Amino acid sequence: MFDAKSFINELPKINQHGFETHALKLFRWQAQNNSVYKTYLKGLGVDPNQISKTSEIPFLPITFFKQHTIKTNDWQAEKVFESSGTSGMETSKHPVKDLGFYQNHSQRLFEEVFGEVNSMHILGLLPSYLERNSSSLISMVSNLIEESTSPYSGFYLNNYEELAHVLTELGKDTKRSVLFGVTFALLDLAEQYELDLSHVTLIETGGMKGRREEITREDLYLVLKERLGFKQIYSEYGMTELLSQAYGENARFILPNTMRVHIREVNDPFSIARTGKTGGVNVIDLANVHTCAFIETQDLGRQLDDGTFEVLGRFDNSELRGCNLLVS
């Protein structure tokens, strides 16, 4: 008998060796109790009881989050995260049963990479996200700002002058400074100021939001290092449809204990690509206990020999959204 509450409590303890067992247990429960996923598997002719390893699991296309309400069993959502989109674009919606769980979980994953948040200054340059109250990224960063307890922590909408001043002043402080920034706003800041922010850890979340032409990540990093002096630049891999996040320097992401990535063949979504080969990114996110943990994204990527993975862009004709990452 699957107990969702007990499963959630076990998430921080899951290790590499236990992931497969937990994922298969969650798959069988969701395959039986998630009406959308159950129907999808039935349409494919898949018997969940015949699935013996995660590489055999069919992943739910991410577009289903636009067309259906994805829930395992019936419950009331405390919050519904919604992806960004241009006017008239259909957006993804991810119902969240327990917002506190999401915030605590995302904080744990952040602290595993960067250290305790209460010893930091957390700043957010995320103007396009702040315009919506349904952004999962804003919910996460808001919690980190609050938990940091720093008087300098906070969001900066379009007040680049104040942000530049605060970041410069924090160079005199012994606490670590972390800046979450959306790509177009970081480039705006770099055009207006030349700063030495070598003491600041930057986490870029991707995205031009239609404000600028897309550029490669290599060119982005070059501008940010030359104009703003960043030495530590991390990227975040997260999206509306996932409750976990991965971080990585130079856009080589290290997966947390609740996530796994399978790269699928471009021309055969049910076959796994070999290590190093570019293909579609399938994500297992064990934190998606109450929705669906097995997501076929529209990202292109590849897994590397050291266990990290890279996101290389998007499939042709797929919409730009949320934390979209630039082609490198």
Image (spheres, helix red, strand yellow):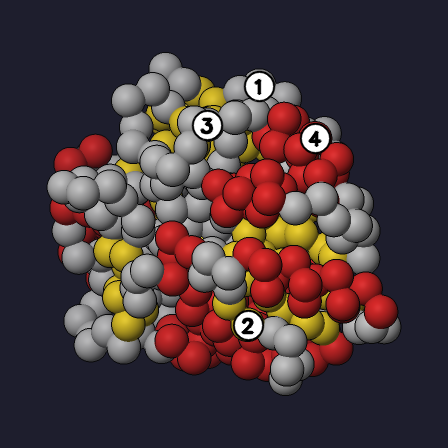
Residue assigned mark 3 = 214
Does the image show residue 218?
A: yes
* Mark-to-mark CA distance, 2 and 1: 40 Å
Amino acid on which the number 3 mark rests in the picture = Glu
Q: Earlier in the sequence, mark 4 or mark 1?
A: 4
Identify the residue shown where x is 15% and y is 36%: 43
Q: Residue at x 48, y 72 (%)?
A: 142
Question: Is 163 placed left or right of 293 in the picture?
Answer: right
Q: Residue at x 63, y 21 (%)?
A: 276
- 314 up-or-down from 308: above or below: above
- Closer to the camera in the image, 278 or 234: 234
- The quarter of the picture where the C terminus appears is top right
The type of residue carrying mark 1 is Lys
Q: Give the label, 4 or 1, closer to the camera.
A: 4
- Find out whether the residues at labels 4 and 3 contact each other: C-beta distance under 8 Å: no
Q: Position of residue 204 (x, y in %)?
A: 58, 47
Question: Answer yes or no: do the residues labelled 4 and 2 have beta carbons within 8 Å?
Answer: no
- 3D distance between C-alphas at marks 3 and 1: 24 Å
Q: Secondary structure at mark 1?
A: loop
Residue 131, percent across and down? 32, 60
Mark in the foreground, 3 or 1: 3
- Kindly identify which numbered label has been placed on residue 222: 4
- Identify the element where label 2 is drawn: strand
Precedes in sequence: disc 3 or disc 1: 3
Label 1 sits on residue = 277
